[in-house]
Image: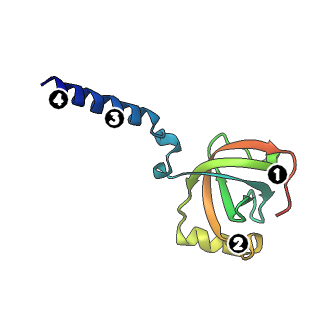
Amino acid sequence: MIQKLAGMLLFVGLTAGLLYAAPKTKDDKMSGSQTVTGCLQKGEEAGGHYVISTENKHWELYPGKGVSLDGHVGHTVTVTGTEAHRSAKQEEKSQPHEKTEAGDKQHADLNVSKVEHVSETCKTQ
C-alpha cells in the first residue's frame, strides 16, 4: 500500500513538473502565432508594408489596432501576429503588388499584433 501511494505521489509530482515546464499557449505554435524578423519595407499598395524575413520569405503585413509600422520602415524588426486569411477578391487586388515585392520568394500574409525594433538598418539579403 505504501509503495503504491509513493508511486502515485511520484507520478503526480513528475506530471506537475512537466506541465509547469510546458510552453505557454500564447507562444505555442499550435495557437497560430507567428514571429518574423526581417527588413520592414513600404509596400506598393497604399498604406502597405512588408518584411523580407531572415528566411528570405515575403510577409505582407496588416497592422492590428494600435500597431504602427511607418516609423520602422528601413529598419530590422520582429513582428508577431497570426497568419491572415484573405478572400479571393482581396488576394486578386493585391496579387500584382505582391509579385513585384516578393519576386520568386515564398509569400504569406500576417495580421500584426506586435512590432519590436531590432536595428536601425537592414542587412542585405
Q: CA distance from mark 4 to mark 1?
A: 63 Å
Q: Which mark is residue 15?
A: 3
Q: CA distance from mark 4 to mark 2?
A: 59 Å
Secondary structure under the numbered disc 1 in the rendered image: loop
Residue 99 % position (x, y): 72, 75
Residue 117 % position (x, y): 77, 42
Q: Farthest residue in the top direction?
A: 2
Q: Is 103 displayed left or right of 90 in the figure?
A: right
> In the rendered structure, which disc, 3 or 2, sits on the residue that comes first in sequence?
3
Q: Which residue is mark 2?
A: 105
Secondary structure under the numbered disc 2 in the rendered image: loop
- Looking at the rendered image, the disc whose residue lies closer to the viewer, 3 or 2, is 3
Residue 89 sits in quarter: bottom right
Q: Which mark is residue 110?
A: none
> Considering the image in quadrants, where does the C terminus appear?
bottom right
The amino acid type, in three-letter code, at marker 4 is: Lys
> In the rendered structure, which disc, 3 or 1, sits on the residue that comes first in sequence?
3
Q: Which mark is residue 73?
A: 1
Q: Please rate how many residues cluster around mark 3, counting C-alpha atoms within 10 Å: few if below 14, some from 14 to 19, many from 20.
A: few
Q: Please rate how many residues cluster around mark 2, counting C-alpha atoms within 10 Å: few if below 14, some from 14 to 19, many from 20.
A: some
Q: CA distance from mark 3 to mark 2?
A: 44 Å
Q: Is residue 45 above or below residue 29?
A: below
Q: Tell me what residue is drawn at x 12 percent, y 25 percent.
A: 1
Q: CA distance from mark 3 to mark 1?
A: 46 Å
Q: Are marks 4 and 1 in contact (CB under 8 Å)?
A: no
> In the rendered structure, which disc, 4 or 2, sits on the residue that comes first in sequence?
4
Q: Tell me what residue is drawn at x 78 percent, y 66 percent.
A: 44
